[in-house]
Image (spheres, rainbow, N blue to C red):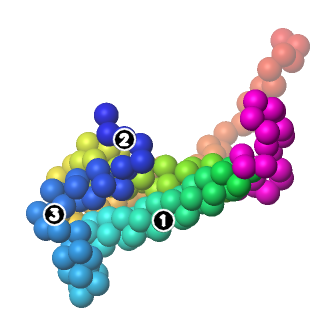
Amino acid sequence: MPDADDVLGVLTEQIQSRFQMPIAELCRAVAAAPQAHPDATTIVRWHGLLTEAQQVLDRAEDALAEALAQHADTVPDGEFVELPEQVMQLADMVNIAHTVRAGRAMSLAHLLDPQAIGNRGSGTWRGAAPAARRGPALPTAAPSVPATAQAPVRGAAR
């Protein structure tokens, strides 16, 4: 199983394998003609979002590591001291950034999985339009009421 911190690298390799070109070249091709291959356009967009999330996570982790190192310098050895609020806020930022990155990675992995729901079927990866609907799934006209005598009420005396 790949290292969780290398999610971006693993997914980038899958994209390059899928489209048989380096990611930078794919990004240029999508920028030049975004309508030519809608799947590639969507995947490149999500790769950009994942890259951005990874950068935010890296910065948040660096800030937390620095704050923890500074705090460790002020604490005597072997003594337990509660972390300052600023350090706890940085830890929360790391958790949030990690969650965002994980969500974007899952979205991108879903888009790359040809067996995922929504990606199955003929033509899905070739940019085919969804099958046209033949008609409404349920009747859209009001049901007709027969013009007969009023039906007896249940539970009435016989």
Residue at the (57%, 59%) spot, across then down:
62
Magenta extent: 72-91
Marks 3 and 2 sit apart, C-alpha to C-alpha, by 24 Å
Looking at the image, tell me whether mark 2 or mark 1 is earlier in sequence order. Answer: 2
**Would you identify the image quadrant in which residue 76 lies?**
top right
Does the magenta segment cover residue 55? Answer: no
Horizontal side, residue 125 vs residue 55: left or right: left
- Residue 84 image point, x, y percent: 83, 50
As helix, strand or loop, the secondary structure at mark 3 comes to helix
Looking at the image, tell me whether mark 3 or mark 1 is earlier in sequence order. Answer: 3
Q: Which mark is residue 122?
A: none
Please determine whether, in this image, residue 145 is positioned above or below residue 63: above
Kindly identify which residue carries mark 2. Answer: 3
Kindly identify which residue carries mark 1. Answer: 55
Residue at the (51%, 59%) spot, across then down:
58
Q: Classify the position of the C terminus by image quarter.
A: top right
- Residue 105 image point, x, y percent: 42, 52
Local crowd size for mark 1, using a 10 Å CA cut-off: few (<14), some (14–19), many (≥20):
some
Kindly identify which residue carries mark 3. Answer: 19
Horizontal side, residue 15 vs residue 79: left or right: left
Q: Identity of the amino acid at label 2?
A: Asp
Horizontal side, residue 140 vs residue 86: left or right: left
Nearest the viewer among 91 and 24 is 91
Residue at the outermost front position? 77
As helix, strand or loop, the secondary structure at mark 2 comes to loop
